Image (tube, grey):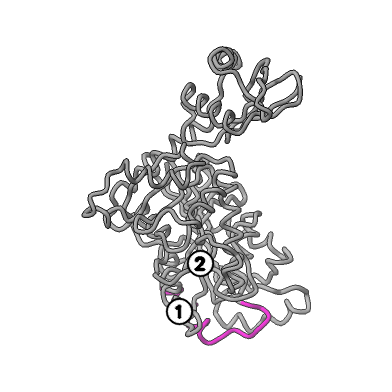
Amino acid sequence: MKKLAKVVIIGFPNVGKSTLFNRLLREKRALVHSLPGMTRDSSCALCVLQGKKFILVDTGGFFDSQEEPLSFLVKEKAWQASQTADLLLFVLDGKREMLPAEEELFLSLRKLNKPILVVVNKIDSEQEEEKIGDYYRLGVEKIFALSAEHKRNLEDLRVSIAASLPLSALEIEEAKPLKIAIVGRINVGKSSLINRLCGEERLIVSEIPGTTRDSTDTLIMRNKKAFCLVDTAGIRKLSHTRDKREKASIIKAKKNIAQADVVCLVLDAQCFPTHQDAAVAQLAHDSGKPLLLALNKWDLLQGENISLEELKSRIFRKLDFVNYAPLLTISALTGKRVIKILDMAEQVYLNACKRIETSRLNDFLAWVMETRPPLGKSKKRVKIKYMTQKGILPPTFVLFTHSRVSLAPSYEKFFTQLLRERFDFWETPIRLFLRES
């Protein structure tokens, strides 16, 4: 498979880079906020324009700020992304004059010998477009005056981006990557884990709580298979946050769970499972997506003589509602067993996509009816005529009965466990519905 071209969006904070990123993708992928500094890590996504496929990269604001403690790291990551680009989109704010520091940045970018398209954003009318002459002092032949928010003059930029990409981009056929949402509470090592899986420091890691604001997609290849690792903000109660950007990040992280193919819940081996761990696990379970648990910082427990079985017992006493999820002990710091996350993610996804023939399901039902007849909430026996599989992700089954009844919660749990054991439905939630027939 050929390497995809990379188009990197760069500029100062609050010039509209993330809005442009979303418009070019034609979907709301990056978080957009009126406050600067929403984007910290570089986020990438597969984009298609004029039949050409490429990697589109959104970067953090290129600016040092005393109010933003991680601004130096944000700038460094943006610069690293620029160095690996095949094409740069240099974005300026058309609502204000160009800053001397922006001119200096442009000159630095030119020294990289990369093609650069200069985009003046927030130009909402023809009258505003007539005033962009000052931007030509950058020495470029063409300025793209547009409004990403209002979709004004976007098509011209799309055509120019496609024209600037190599012809080989037309030949690339990409399989849809398996999307793995890396979730958990604050400071459990989610970004460090993704950096270890990438084999490089792609994401900013800091002891400052809430370092990750926007969810960040990172594309990697392993054994010719594509994976999209989604680094999410640490999830905690919205009432515990004051920063509006962090609140937006938490809401986005919850959406990422619903949009993922597989959810990987990261726990901290030094402090687990907490109430917040349980809350995140409940979100993952309710989403219906296949789930795996990664106990990070495992290396710090090596001298405490704790067995894996003891750990499992301790974890699933509190998280018994996700006892179907496999548990991996890992260390993002040393890299121990982190690669197993990708292998396990493939396995749990395939399990969650399984379909069982109706005849096999009804053979199973007949055996259950004979050995352990179903009980309803009233403790009376429930006669189930037949069952069928309605869907996948999660595996969903419909049980047809003579009358409107509900299974006793304890029996539903028991029946679900039997389904798992008979048809190997581990690693995924199972949904049961009773329907009168």
Vertical comparison of 360 with 81: above or below:
above
At mark 1, the secondary structure is: loop
- The residue segment tinted magenta is 93-111
Report whether 339 appears left or right of 82. left
Question: What mark, if any, has residue 69 been given in the picture?
Answer: 1
* Front residue of this view, candidates 97 and 354: 354
At mark 2, the secondary structure is: loop
Residue 142 rendering spot, x and y as whole percentages: 61, 71
Q: Residue furthest toward the front? A: 379
Residue at x 62%, y 64% (from the top left corner): 20
Report whether 432 appears left or right of 152. left
Residue at x 57%, y 69% (from the top left corner): 240
Residue 68 rendering spot, x and y as whole percentages: 49, 79
Earlier in the chain: of badge 2 and badge 1, it is: 2
Question: What mark, if any, has residue 59 been given in the picture?
Answer: 2
Q: Amino acid at mark 1?
A: Pro
The answer to which image quadrant residue 146 occupies is bottom right
The answer to which image quadrant residue 286 occupies is top right
Q: Residue furthest toward the bottom? A: 100
Callout 1 crowding tier (Cα within 10 Å): few <14, some 14–19, many ≥20: few
* Front residue of this view, candidates 422 and 152: 422
